[in-house]
Image (cartoon, rainbow, N blue to C red):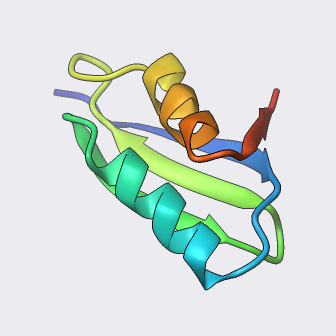
Amino acid sequence: MPKETQNLNVQGMSCQHCVHAVKSSVSALDGVDSVDVSLEKNLVTVGFDPAKTSLQSITTAIEGEGYTVVR
């Protein structure tokens, strides 16, 4: 299956707890291969299989942790 990589601008992250919360919630989704969080850039890079999960599901997981995904 082809893998897709998306960069998401995420507001509200400020510490390592934020990084852990985002990584844990997104990694728990079926089809997610990688999650990289940059506090400095407010950026979350997600590698995933679009046949198993969607960008909307990833966004929902991040927003469920209390952060804002800016489109």
Residue sitting at x 82%, y 27%: 71
Residue sitting at x 72%, y 46%: 67
Q: Is residue 26 above or below residue 48?
A: below
Q: Is residue 34 above or below residue 32?
A: below
The x and y percentages for residue 16 are 61, 83
The x and y percentages for residue 49 are 27, 31
Using the image as rendered, state which of residue 11 and residue 50 is in the foreground: 11
12 horizontally vs 22: left or right = right
45 horizontally vs 10: left or right = left
The image quadrant that residue 4 belongs to is top left
The x and y percentages for residue 3 are 31, 36
Q: Is residue 11 above or below residue 37?
A: above
Residue sitting at x 41%, y 19%: 54
Using the image as rendered, state which of residue 47 and residue 67 is in the foreground: 67
Farthest-out residue, bottom? 16
39 horizontally vs 25: left or right = right
39 horizontally vs 2: left or right = right
Quarter of the N terminus within the rendering: top left
Residue sitting at x 26%, y 47%: 28
Q: How many marks?
A: 0
